């Protein structure tokens, strides 16, 4: 779930992508942060997740309407 963020609250909330676990169509646990770091220490937003999707290879695509980009997020490569 992309949390677009609220600019008019202190502290700011959202500005991240979360995973909500489900079992049999019912939420089964607390949300888990998947992608964070969209807000600088001074409070300026570097990005705001506007939408999420998964591509054919399983990567997470995150539309960012502040940076005007689509982030492609993958897992870490396996070490050999």
Image: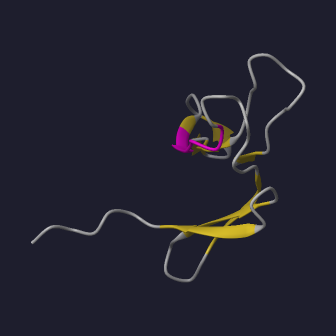
Q: How is the image coloured?
A: secondary structure
Q: Residue furthest bottom?
A: 56
Reply yes or no: does residue 9 show up in magenta: no
Give x and y (percent) for residue 8. Answer: 90, 25
Look at the picture and state if 11 lies above or below 7. above
The quadrant of the image that shows the C terminus is bottom left
Reply yes or no: does residue 34 show up in magenta: yes
User: How many marks overall?
Assistant: 0
Look at the picture and state if 57 lies above or below 51. below
- The reply, left or right, for residue 4 in relation to residue 42 is right
- The reply, left or right, for residue 75 in relation to residue 10 is left
Q: Residue furthest front?
A: 42
Residue 23 sits in quarter? top right
Q: Residue furthest top?
A: 10
Closer-to-camera residue (50/24): 50
- Residue depicted at 79% across the width and 44% down the height: 4
Q: Residue furthest right?
A: 8
Q: Which residues are magenta?
A: 33-39
Give x and y (percent) for residue 13. Answer: 74, 27
- Residue depicted at 75% across the width and 25% down the height: 12
Give x and y (percent) for residue 31. Answer: 59, 33
- Residue depicted at 57% across the width and 33% down the height: 28
Closer-to-camera residue (48/27): 48
- Residue depicted at 71% across the width and 40% down the height: 15
Give x and y (percent) for residue 39. Answer: 66, 38
């Amino acid at each position: 779930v992309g949390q677009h963020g609220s600019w008019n609250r202190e502290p700011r909330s959202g500005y991240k992508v979360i995973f909500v676990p489900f079992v049999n169509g019912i939420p089964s646990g607390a949300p888990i942060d998947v992608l964070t770091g969209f807000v600088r220490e001074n409070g300026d937003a570097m990005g705001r997740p506007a939408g999420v999707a998964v591509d054919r290879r399983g990567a997470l695509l995150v539309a960012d309407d502040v940076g005007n980009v689509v982030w492609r997020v993958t897992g870490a490569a396996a070490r050999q």
